[in-house]
């Protein structure tokens, strides 16, 4: 997750790392959800939380996902979690349980391959963050190959390679399109060597303006640089994180919201793709949402200014409108809400990044849960009528 216009960082931190709290369709069915032939697809973005839930907590979360009507679960498959201590030891069991319990409910898993164990990280940041890029792209690619080899037989064929590489919080050496391209160029063929039909997504781009002092590179600039370097030839789709709160995603503005920057502003993502020979490449919105807790006043309408979060009622409006706004953009294939559950109680010291959930920390549902469920159901009913 990333900084949005005027609202600060809405992200879980990448340093939560290992130990952080918190009939089945086949590959052909999964692939069809990535096209608009079957209409817009829907998902929940869990970050690293689903992996660390108890069996009972995970079952409740996935049953709620089914009730919401989503098809996709975006879950961090962190290299640091799988091989935390050495290149010869593996800890796949927790992620096995995620995949098995999801597939048992007919849900598809989108693993985000990311985050480096200390033993494999760039020495300049190995001891500071798991968002440190790997010292050897080949080692990361081998981890990805083994993940695909393990989970393709379980029905996992769609992969996102890293998260928000255009901002320093998630690429600790500072955003570097050439270095990310090298990682992608090593990883994509490694996955396809064991699963030729794998569907690969670019690491989700944070929706930010270029800010050298923070080492942020805008999503448009970073995508254009990737296009120039040939990175887009390695993937089947791009992913993007357009947070707009307190504005609704469908709101039109003179300067352009993060949603408008998909295909309506002068320098939009669709135009960048076309410029580099990828006209028609799908766009997956692998994160969007709004937090309901932070310091200061909560926004209760779109006109609110100088606020860091929104009321539960406005979050519900944003959730409902996310479906409408995404469905109106032809290039958008799947949209994921971040996130399922708040990561901590609401206290004076709690972090905004922990309060994007559709449910509170104690499991109570926010109004946004029902709003999103109703919007997805209404969208699907409308699609069914069109197809009759």
Image (cartoon, rainbow, N blue to C red):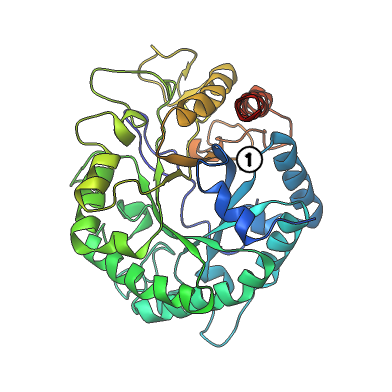
Residue that extends furthest to the bottom in the rendered view of this protein: 88
Quarter holding the N terminus is: top left
Q: Position of residue 360 (x, y in %)?
A: 67, 33
Q: Position of residue 230 (x, y in %)?
A: 24, 63
In which quarter of the view is residue 179 placed?
Answer: bottom left
Q: Where is residue 232 in the image (x, y as percent from the top left)?
A: 30, 59
Residue 338 visible? no
Residue at 20%, 55% (x, y): give it: 225
Q: Say above or below: 80 vs 297.
A: below
Q: In this view, does 93 lie to the left or right of 220?
A: right
Q: What element carries label 1?
A: loop
In the image shown, does 164 or 6 lie closer to the viewer? 164
In the image shown, does 287 or 366 lie closer to the viewer? 287
Residue 40 visible? yes
Q: In this view, does 371 lie to the left or right of 189?
A: right
Q: Say above or below: 181 vs 110.
A: below
How packed mark 1 is, by other alpha carbons closer than 10 Å (few <14, some 14-19, many 20 or more), is many
Residue that extends furthest to the front in the rendered view of this protein: 388
Residue at 62%, 75% (x, y): give it: 150
Q: Say above or below: 362 vs 95.
A: above
In the image shown, does 295 or 231 lie closer to the viewer? 231
Q: Position of residue 250 (x, y in %)?
A: 42, 21
In the image shown, does 87 or 25 lie closer to the viewer? 25
Q: How many labels does the image show?
A: 1
**Residue pointed to by mark 1:** 340
Quarter holding the C terminus is: top right
């Amino acid at each position: 997750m990333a900084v949005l216009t005027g609202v600060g960082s809405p992200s879980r931190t990448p340093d939560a790392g290992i130990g952080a709290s918190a009939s089945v369709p086949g590959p052909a069915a999964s692939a069809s959800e990535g096209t608009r032939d079957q209409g817009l697809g829907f998902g929940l973005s869990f970050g690293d939380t689903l992996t660390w839930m108890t069996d009972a907590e995970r079952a409740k979360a996935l049953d709620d996902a089914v009730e919401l009507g989503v098809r996709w679960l975006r879950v961090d498959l962190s290299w640091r979690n799988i091989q935390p201590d050495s290149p010869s030891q593996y800890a796949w069991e927790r992620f096995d349980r995620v995949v098995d319990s999801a597939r048992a409910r007919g849900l598809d898993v989108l693993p985000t391959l990311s985050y480096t164990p200390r033993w494999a990280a760039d020495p300049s940041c190995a001891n500071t963050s798991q968002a440190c890029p790997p010292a050897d792209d080949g080692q990361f690619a081998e981890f990805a190959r083994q993940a695909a080899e393990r989970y393709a037989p379980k029905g996992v064929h769609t992969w996102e390679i890293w998260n928000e590489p255009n901002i320093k919080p998630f690429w600790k050496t500072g955003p570097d399109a050439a270095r990310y391209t090298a990682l992608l160029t090593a990883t994509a063929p490694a996955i396809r060597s064991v699963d030729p039909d794998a569907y690969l997504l670019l690491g989700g781009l944070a929706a930010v303006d270029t800010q050298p002092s923070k080492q942020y590179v805008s999503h448009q600039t970073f995508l254009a640089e990737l296009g120039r370097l040939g990175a887009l030839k390695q993937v089947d789709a791009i992913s993007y994180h357009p947070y707009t709160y307190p504005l609704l995603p469908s709101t039109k503005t003179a300067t352009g919201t993060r949603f408008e920057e998909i295909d309506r502003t002068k320098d939009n993502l669709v135009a960048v793709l076309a410029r580099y020979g990828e006209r028609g490449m799908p766009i997956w919105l692998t994160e969007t949402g709004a937090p309901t807790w932070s310091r200061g006043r909560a926004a209760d309408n779109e006109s609110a200014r100088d606020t860091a979060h929104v009321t539960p009622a406005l979050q519900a409006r944003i959730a409902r409108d996310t479906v409408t706004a995404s469905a109106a953009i032809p290039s958008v294939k799947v949209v994921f809400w971040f996130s399922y559950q708040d990561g901590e109680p609401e206290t004076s010291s709690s972090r905004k990044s922990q309060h994007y959930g559709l449910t509170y920390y104690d499991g109570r549902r926010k109004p946004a849960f029902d709003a999103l469920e109703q919007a997805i159901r209404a969208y699907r009913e409308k699609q069914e009528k069109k197809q009759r």
